[in-house]
C-alpha cells in the first residue's frame, strides 16, 4: 500500500546588507515529511537549515525520545530523500529528525507511519520478495488478439521462442549478452474484435470469457510465456544463467462501464458473474471485483506454469489516458481515480506491481503516483512526428517534472529490409497516415538515436527505467534482418539497453 503526502519546501532568503548579499546563520531547524511507504520500506524527505548535522531515528517505540537519545541512537543523514529499509510488515513506526549546530538543537520533528499488511494468499514468488519488484527495462510484446496485418506483410498470431529471441539476448563483436529484464504482454482487441480498452468508436467491450482467453494465451501450458521461458533457457545453455529471473507483466483489460462505450444506453451488466453474482459495471465496486478476479486468475495460472526463469511482477493498465479529474472527458463513465487506488492496494498486499505507459499529454499523466502506479513510462511519440507538433525536448521535460521513465519507440518503418522488400511499402505516422517510405529509414533511425542520446544528456540513464515499443514485430524484423545496416542499428539499440547502469 502506498500513501502520498504533500511535500513542504523550505525557502531560504538571503538578506542584502551594505549592497552585498549575506546569509544569517540562525538556530538550526529541520522539517521531516513522509513521501511514501510500502510493506517493507518508507521514504522520508528531510530538509534542514543552519544545521551542521541532521540525525534521524526510526523506532517501533511510541515513547518520544529526547534530543540526546536521537543523537546517540540515530544516524546522520544528508538533507533530501532518505529510504528506510528493510522494515517489518504491518507495523507502526515513528521517525524523528533533529538538527544540530554546535551546542544548539532544533525542535524535534516526528512522522508516524504504518507499513502495509500482506494478504494471506501469497504465492511462493510473492512471499520471497520484500516488496513490489523493480527492473531497469521492459519490452512490449503484442499478441493474444486478432492478428495485426497490413497490406504488405502479416504479423504472427502467436509468440514462440524464436520470436522472443531478439528480445532475450543479442550478439555483438564481444559475444552474446542478456537483453531485457522484463516482458509486457500487450493486447487491445480479442479474436472476435471485442476491445479490451475503452473505445469510443463503436467496438464491443470484452467480456469475462474474453478476459479468460487473454490470460490463457499468455499463461497456459503451451502459451506465450512458456515459449519465453524456453527462449531464455536456450540462451542460458549458451552463455550461462541470467543474473536474475526475468519479470513478466500481464496486461489488465479495462472494466468498461458499457457493452458499447459509444452507446451510453447499452448494458452495464454484460461482462459476467463472479461468485455466482452478475457484475454491473455502473458500480465501481463491481469494476474492482472484476479486476481482482482477473488478478487472481493470472496469479493462479502463473503459479501452475512452473517456469524456470520467469517471475510475475504485476499488471499493466491498458488505457493510455486515465481521466483523473472530475472535469475530464467522460469522467463519470471512467472514474479511474476511484477505481485504481484500491486496485493498487490489492496488488501491493500481494507484492505485485501496477504499471502504466501514457502518451505524452494524457489526462492523469501528472497524477500517476496518486493513482497508485509503481512505475510509469512516458510515450514521447516523437518517432511518428510528421508535423513538428511533438518535440522530443518537451517529452524529456515532462519526464523530469513527473519522475517518469521513457518509452523508446519505433516500428517496421525503420527496418530497411522491410521497407525495401515491397515496392511502394509505406509506414504510418502518429495519426495513422501512411507517409514514411524507404527514403525515411535513416531519418527515423536518427529519431531513435535522439531518444537514446537525450535520455543520457538529461541525466536519466541509470536513474529511470526504459520501456521499448517496437510495433507488432519490428524488434524481430530488425534483429533477424539480413541487411547490415539493420543489424548495426539493432546492436546499437541493444547496447543502449544492456549498458543501462540501472541494471547494476
Image (cartoon, helix red, strand yellow):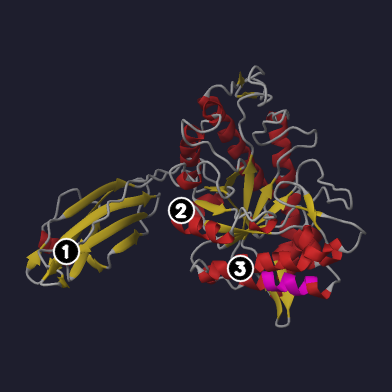
Residue 80 visible here: yes
Q: CA distance from mark 2 to mark 1?
A: 30 Å
Q: Which residue is painted at 27% across and 59% down in the image?
A: 46
Q: CA distance from mark 1 to mark 3?
A: 42 Å
Secondary structure of the residue carrying tag 1 is: strand
Q: Which residue is painted at 20% across and 51% down in the image?
A: 110
Relative height, residue 106 to residue 487 (above, below): above
Secondary structure of the residue carrying tag 2 is: helix
Q: Position of residue 375 (x, y in %)?
A: 51, 52
Q: Residue furthest right?
A: 423
Magenta highlight on residue 60: no
Q: Earlier in the sequence, mark 2 or mark 1?
A: 1
Q: Residue furthest bottom?
A: 174
Residue 402's tag is 2
Q: Which residue is painted at 79% across and 70% down in the image?
A: 486
Q: Main secondary structure of the magenta part?
A: helix
How many other residues sit within 10 Å of disc 2, few (<14), some (14-19) or many (≥20)?
Answer: some
Q: Position of residue 255 (x, y in %)?
A: 61, 31
Q: Position of residue 263 (x, y in %)?
A: 67, 21
In this picture, which residue range is highlighted in magenta? 486-493
Q: Earlier in the sequence, mark 1 or mark 3?
A: 1
Residue 452's tag is 3
State the image quarter where residue 13 is shown.
Answer: bottom left
Q: CA distance from mark 2 to mark 3?
A: 19 Å
Magenta highlight on residue 489: yes
Q: What is the quadrant of the N terminus in the image?
A: top left
Give the residue number, with chain letter if any, for mark 1: 99
Q: Position of residue 305 (x, y in %)?
A: 69, 49
Amino acid at each position: 500500500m502506498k500513501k502520498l503526502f504533500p511535500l513542504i519546501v523550505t525557502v531560504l532568503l538571503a538578506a542584502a546588507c551594505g549592497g552585498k548579499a549575506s546569509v544569517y546563520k540562525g538556530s538550526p531547524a529541520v522539517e521531516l515529511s513522509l513521501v511514501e511507504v510500502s510493506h517493507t520500506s518508507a521514504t522520508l524527505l528531510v530538509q534542514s537549515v543552519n544545521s551542521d548535522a541532521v540525525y534521524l531515528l526510526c523506532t517501533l517505540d511510541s515513547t518520544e525520545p529526547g534530543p540526546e537519545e536521537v543523537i546517540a541512537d540515530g544516524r546522520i543523514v544528508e538533507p533530501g530523500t532518505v529510504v528506510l529499509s528493510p522494515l517489518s510488515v504491518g507495523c507502526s513506526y515513528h521517525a524523528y529528525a533533529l538538527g544540530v549546530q554546535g551546542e544548539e538543537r532544533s525542535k524535534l520533528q516526528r512522522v508516524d507511519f504504518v507499513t502495509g499488511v500482506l494478504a494471506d494468499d501469497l504465492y511462493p514468488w510473492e512471499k520471497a520478495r520484500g516488496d513490489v519488484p523493480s527492473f531497469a527495462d521492459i519490452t512490449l510484446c503484442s499478441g493474444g488478439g486478432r492478428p495485426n496485418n497490413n497490406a504488405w506483410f502479416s504479423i504472427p498470431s502467436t509468440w514462440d521462442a524464436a520470436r522472443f529471441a531478439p528480445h532475450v539476448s543479442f550478439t555483438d563483436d564481444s559475444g552474446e549478452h542478456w537483453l531485457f529484464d522484463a516482458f509486457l504482454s500487450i493486447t487491445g482487441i480479442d479474436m472476435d474484435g471485442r476491445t479490451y480498452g475503452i473505445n469510443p468508436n463503436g467496438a464491443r467491450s470484452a467480456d469475462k470469457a474474453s478476459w479468460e482467453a487473454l490470460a490463457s494465451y499468455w499463461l497456459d501450458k503451451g502459451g506465450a510465456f512458456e515459449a519465453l521461458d524456453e527462449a531464455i533457457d536456450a540462451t542460458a545453455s549458451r552463455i550461462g544463467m541470467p543474473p536474475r529471473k526475468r519479470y513478466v507483466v500481464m496486461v489488465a483489460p479495462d472494466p468498461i462501464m458499457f457493452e458499447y462505450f459509444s452507446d451510453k444506453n447499452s448494458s452495464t451488466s454484460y461482462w459476467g458473474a463472479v461468485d455466482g453474482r452478475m457484475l454491473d459495471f455502473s458500480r465501481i465496486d463491481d469494476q474492482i471485483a472484476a479486476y481482482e478476479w482477473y488478478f487472481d486468475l493470472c496469479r493462479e495460472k502463473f503459479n501452475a506454469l512452473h517456469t524456470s526463469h520467469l517471475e510475475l511482477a504485476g499488471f499493466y493498465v491498458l488505457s493510455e489516458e486515465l481521466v483523473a479529474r472530475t472535469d475530464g472527458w467522460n469522467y463519470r463513465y471512467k472514474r479511474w481515480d476511484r477505481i485504481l487506488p484500491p486496485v493498487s492496494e490489492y496488488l501491493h498486499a500481494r507484492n505485485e506491481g501496477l504499471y502504466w505507459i501514457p502518451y505524452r499529454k494524457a489526462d492523469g499523466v501528472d497524477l500517476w503516483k496518486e493513482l497508485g502506479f509503481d512505475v510509469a513510462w512516458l510515450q514521447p511519440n516523437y518517432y511518428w512526428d510528421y508535423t513538428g507538433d511533438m518535440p522530443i525536448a518537451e517529452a524529456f521535460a515532462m519526464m523530469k517534472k513527473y519522475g517518469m521513465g521513457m518509452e523508446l519507440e519505433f516500428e517496421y518503418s525503420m527496418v530497411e529490409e522491410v521497407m525495401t522488400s515491397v515496392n511502394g511499402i509505406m509506414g504510418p505516422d502518429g495519426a495513422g497516415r501512411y507517409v514514411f517510405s524507404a527514403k525515411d529509414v535513416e531519418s527515423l533511425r536518427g529519431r531513435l538515436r535522439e531518444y537514446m542520446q537525450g535520455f543520457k544528456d538529461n541525466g536519466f540513464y541509470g536513474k529511470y527505467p526504459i520501456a521499448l515499443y517496437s510495433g507488432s514485430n519490428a524488434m524481430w524484423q530488425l534483429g533477424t534482418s539480413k541487411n547490415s545496416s539493420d543489424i548495426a542499428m539493432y546492436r546499437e539499440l541493444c547496447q543502449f539497453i544492456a549498458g543501462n547502469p540501472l541494471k547494476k
